[in-house]
Image: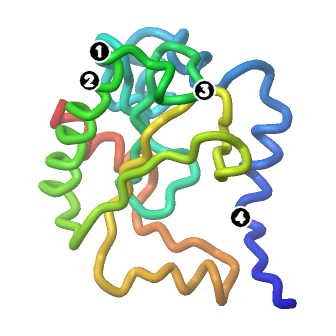
C-alpha cells in the first residue's frame, strides 16, 4: 500500500480540532468592514456569505456559506439555496475576470465521511482551475504553491461584489 502525505493539512486539522463551536457561525457573527476584511469575507448576502478558503487549493478558491447552521443542503430553505447559486455565479464571473481560469470545480462535501472539514455546516466550494494544474507539488513535494497572499486575493475579488 502506498501513502501520499499531505502535511500542509495538519495546520487545518489542528485549527479545526481546537475550534470552539462552528467556524462559519463565528465568521457570520463577526460584523463590520474590518472584521470582514480580517476574516476574508468577500461579500455578505441576505442568506449566505462569500469567504476565501483559508487553505485554498488554488488562488481564488472561495466558499459560499449560509448563515443558518445546517448540515445538509436538503434541510435549507429555497431562498438560501437560490441565493447560494446566484452568489456562485457572481463569484465565478469575478474569478473569471481576475484570474482567467480554464475551468472551475464547484461542489460540496456533505458529512464527515464525504470529506467535509466542517461537517455540521454545509457550504459550496468554487475553485478556479487551469489546464495542467494537477497540483503535482502537493503529491510530489508535499507543498502547495500559491502565487498570491489571501489579502491580495481578497482585494481582487471584493470589488466585484
Q: Which residue is mark 1?
A: 79
Label 1, secondary structure: give it: helix
Q: Which residue is mark 4?
A: 8
67 relative position to 15: left or right: left
Taking the spot 77% from the left edge, 40% from the top edge, the residue there is 15
Q: Earlier in the sequence, mark 2 or mark 3?
A: 3
103 relative position to 51: left or right: left
67 versus 94 height, above or below: above
Quadrant of the image occupied by residue 99: bottom left
Q: Which residue is mark 3?
A: 71
Q: Earlier in the sequence, mark 4 or mark 1?
A: 4
Label 4, secondary structure: give it: helix
Pointer 3 with pointer 1, Cβ within 8 A:
no
Question: Disc 2 vs disc 3: which is toward the camera?
Answer: 3
Q: Quadrant of the C terminus?
A: top left
Q: Residues within 10 Å of mark 4 (few under 14, many from 20)?
A: few
Question: Disc 4 vs disc 1: which is toward the camera?
Answer: 1
7 relative position to 79: left or right: right
Amino acid at each position: 500500500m502506498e501513502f501520499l502525505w499531505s502535511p500542509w493539512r495538519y495546520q487545518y486539522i489542528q485549527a479545526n480540532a481546537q475550534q470552539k463551536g462552528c467556524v462559519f457561525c463565528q465568521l457570520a457573527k463577526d460584523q463590520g468592514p474590518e472584521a470582514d476584511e480580517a476574516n476574508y469575507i468577500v461579500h455578505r448576502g441576505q442568506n449566505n456569505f462569500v469567504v476565501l478558503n483559508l487553505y485554498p487549493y488554488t488562488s481564488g478558491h472561495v466558499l459560499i456559506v449560509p448563515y443558518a447552521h445546517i448540515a445538509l443542503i436538503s434541510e435549507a430553505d429555497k431562498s438560501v439555496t437560490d441565493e447560494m447559486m446566484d452568489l456562485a455565479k457572481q463569484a465565478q464571473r469575478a474569478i473569471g475576470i481576475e484570474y482567467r481560469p480554464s475551468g472551475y470545480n464547484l461542489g460540496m462535501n456533505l458529512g464527515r465521511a464525504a470529506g467535509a472539514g466542517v461537517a455540521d455546516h454545509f457550504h459550496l466550494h468554487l475553485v478556479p482551475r487551469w489546464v495542467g494544474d494537477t497540483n503535482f507539488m502537493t503529491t510530489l513535494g508535499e507543498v502547495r504553491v500559491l502565487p498570491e497572499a489571501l489579502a491580495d486575493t481578497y482585494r481582487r475579488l471584493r470589488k466585484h461584489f
